[in-house]
Image: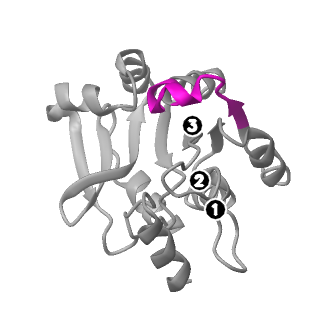
Amino acid sequence: MTVGLLLAAGEGQRLGHGPKAMLRAPDADSLVRRAVITLLDGGCDRVVVVAGAGADEVRAELSTLPCQLVVNPAWSSGLASSFAAGVAEAARLGASRVLVALVDQPGLTPGAVEHLLARAAPSRVTAAAYDGERGHPLLLPLAFAQEAAAQATGDAGAREWLRAHPELVDLVELGHLADGRDIDTPTDLAAWREAR
């Protein structure tokens, strides 16, 4: 079973518009709602959303979608705690593999998720690549995800584990199916909204 793990706990302080999960373009779904639908339509069996900042808003936004919400009370300590909370919930749900996605990546498409899942090899990590550069989503067998979560600190998720195990990582190019850019700055946010 593939569980999509959507990391959506950040407050988006640099953007100044409230929690990233709740950002939206005019006449569009919020980032968190859009991402959950993308993961489900792309082939994830279940979706776990880890919320932190604005958790009540996120819960209300997702109330009509079939997903599991985990509230991370330590979200402000960095992404590592949200990653660990999400992996623990995925394990509780019986996941055999975990697809880690970021809420602030609105260019992800169901087709890209489906392509990544279809090209995953057993006992390997399958990572999205955009023009050859590793990005998200990232598909890990549950045991690897648990190892990575146990080692994660601060604002890094699986980064240190991946750095220590490059021989286990396969890159799958998604640039022809999705836009891998994150929304990290006001300029990024404006560009995304204008493109809608």
Q: Is residue 176 left or right of residue 35?
A: left
Q: Is residue 86 visible?
A: no
Q: Is residue 36 visible?
A: yes
Query: What residue is disc 3 on?
Result: 1
What amino acid does circle 1 point to? Leu
At 70% from the left edge and 68% from the top edge, which residue is drawn?
29
- Which quarter of the image is occupied by the C terminus? bottom right
Q: Residue furthest left?
A: 167
How far apart marks 3 and 2 lie (CA) works out to 28 Å
What span is colored magenta in the figure?
69-82
Measured from the top left, where is residue 30 in percent x and y? 68, 63
At 39% from the left edge and 73% from the top edge, which residue is drawn?
177
- Which quarter of the image is occupied by the N terminus? top right
The colour style of the image is one colour
Query: What residue is disc 1 on?
Result: 23
Q: Is residue 26 left or right of residue 102?
A: right
**Label 3: few (<14), some (14–19) or many (≥20) C-alpha neighbours in 10 Å:** some
**Closer-to-camera residue (94/28):** 28
Measured from the top left, where is residue 39 in percent x and y? 58, 55
What amino acid does circle 2 point to? Lys
**Closer-to-camera residue (144/150):** 150
At 34% from the left edge and 53% from the top edge, which residue is drawn?
119
